Amino acid sequence: MSLRHRLHATLTALFLSASTLLAAEPDRPEAPTPNAPRVILISIDGLHPDDLVRHAPPTLQRWQATGARAQWMTPVYPTLTFPNHYTLVTGRVPDRHGVVHNRMRDAELGPFRLSLRAAVSDGRWWDEAEPLWVTLRRQGLRSATLFWPGSEARIHGIRPDDWLPYAGDMPHEERVRRVLRWLDRPEARRPHLMTLYFSALDEAGHREGPDSPEAIAALADIDRALARLEAGLRRRGLFDAVDVVVVSDHGMARVDVANPRRLDERVVLHDDEVVSSGEAAGIAPRPGREAEVEAALLGRHEGYQCWRKADLPPAWRYGTHRRVPPIVCQADEGVYLTHAARQARGGTFSPGAHGYAPELPSMRAVFLARGPRVAEGVVLPPIEATDVHPFLLALLGLPPMAGDGNPAATAAARRGVSAPASAAGRNAGPSASPPSPAGAPRPGPSGTRTASPETRGR
Ligand SMILES: [Zn+2]
């Protein structure tokens, strides 16, 4: 039987068993199978694959040595926290899941910002895609989120079985303790998918710069929390029964703080016209001002470039969604892009930032996994953020869903699945080459290791 037929047969069987469960118990099966999969999905915000080599966090190194990883994972555009986290759990690019930026404006819903709790927890911002925890609920499985963008909203009317309002100050130890307590529940109430989120590395990288002593210390602290998670799993005899998947949402670049660029250097921009500012900015000119603003902004400038949303580089798969403002301006790597109103508010210069073009080496994210359903010692060629969702579905024993990712890209990372030679598709390339050597400089604003000319500078 060909792999495709075997896969099809397996999936059909899985689907039928899931349907049977649903038919028998429309709400939720009372007694899930004792060998039901358990997955802990961990996001370390701002973790770059080179961090794992250069700073050698022991727990993460041990996990990837006994599991699988991708050389790197390319984030989706824009390389910001919310759009990428929602892609990871939906398999869709932001144009097709609707969370197109950390800051948005919607004709009906008004403004969206991370600090607006009412917006963040309003399902209408998220309803265009189905996050994993909604899929699991529909399949009769349970989810618990220790923070994940979208988990505070009722999406398609459904929240994770357990979730918490975001509390950035919750100590790492407490986060780990809560996940372990979920695993101590009786089988019928034990989540199948758990998420765990750490922001400390991203915060230190913004504040002090990537590779700063503060960023290195933050990563070490997160790694110690993961060591406690491992110890807790081992005490329960679960370390080899639970699959752990570690991802990040983007990397971090050094910012040239001495040379900020002004979006409004050629035209006055009213504050309400700047829907989002910073590295990936969005401009919506007031009615009647479109021609003037376009004439000043469109095209290439020193340190940044602006496009009409329909003309963005195709590789970014971005610009068709109604929430993307009419003009998008992208800062070059390491450029701090600002405007008068932002400066007046006292916008601070951070020595570290993300939000730059996703194909830049500095923006690369991490994908690694270990556990009973994960192959050992596999290094995948680079994958994309959209490829993680099909991998998680497969680990959870769920049928594939239509999405923007390539299920074949991660197939070799699953135990017992051998990827056909051609399956890597667009990701085909030299495999299993090591990450950049320890001590190599992280790509920075000097322009070292910049991206391919096809997608840059257009
Ligand atoms: Zn982030």
Image (cartoon, rainbow, N blue to C red):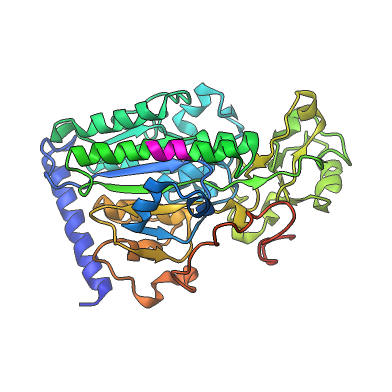
User: Compared to 91, does 412 lie above or below?
Assistant: below
**Ligand 1: quadrant of the figure:** top right
Q: Position of residue 444 (x, y in %)?
A: 69, 52
Majority secondary structure of magenta residues: helix
Q: Residue furthest right?
A: 266
Q: Residue at x 83, y 42 (%)?
A: 293
Dividing the image into 4 quarters, which one contains the C terminus? bottom right
User: Compared to 405, does 55 lie above or below?
Assistant: above
The total number of labels drawn is 0
Q: Is residue 244 visible?
A: yes
Q: Quadrant of residue 364?
A: bottom right
Q: Is residue 394 left or right of residue 19?
A: right
Q: Residue at x 81, y 40 (%)?
A: 258
Q: Position of residue 392 (x, y in %)?
A: 33, 51
Q: Nearer the viewer, residue 230 or 386?
A: 230
Dividing the image into 4 quarters, which one contains the N terminus? bottom left
Q: Is residue 365 left or right of residue 316?
A: left
Q: Position of residue 338 (x, y in %)?
A: 77, 36
Q: Position of residue 146 (x, y in %)?
A: 37, 31
Q: Residue at x 64, y 47 (%)?
A: 253
Q: Residue at x 48, y 74 (%)?
A: 430
Q: Is residue 309 left or right of residue 100?
A: right
User: Compared to 228, does 63 lie above or below?
Assistant: below
**Is residue 338 one of those drawn in magenta?**
no
Q: Which residues are magenta?
A: 220-224
Q: Is residue 262 visible?
A: no
Q: Nearer the viewer, residue 262 or 286?
A: 262
User: Compared to 11, does 167 lie above or below?
Assistant: above
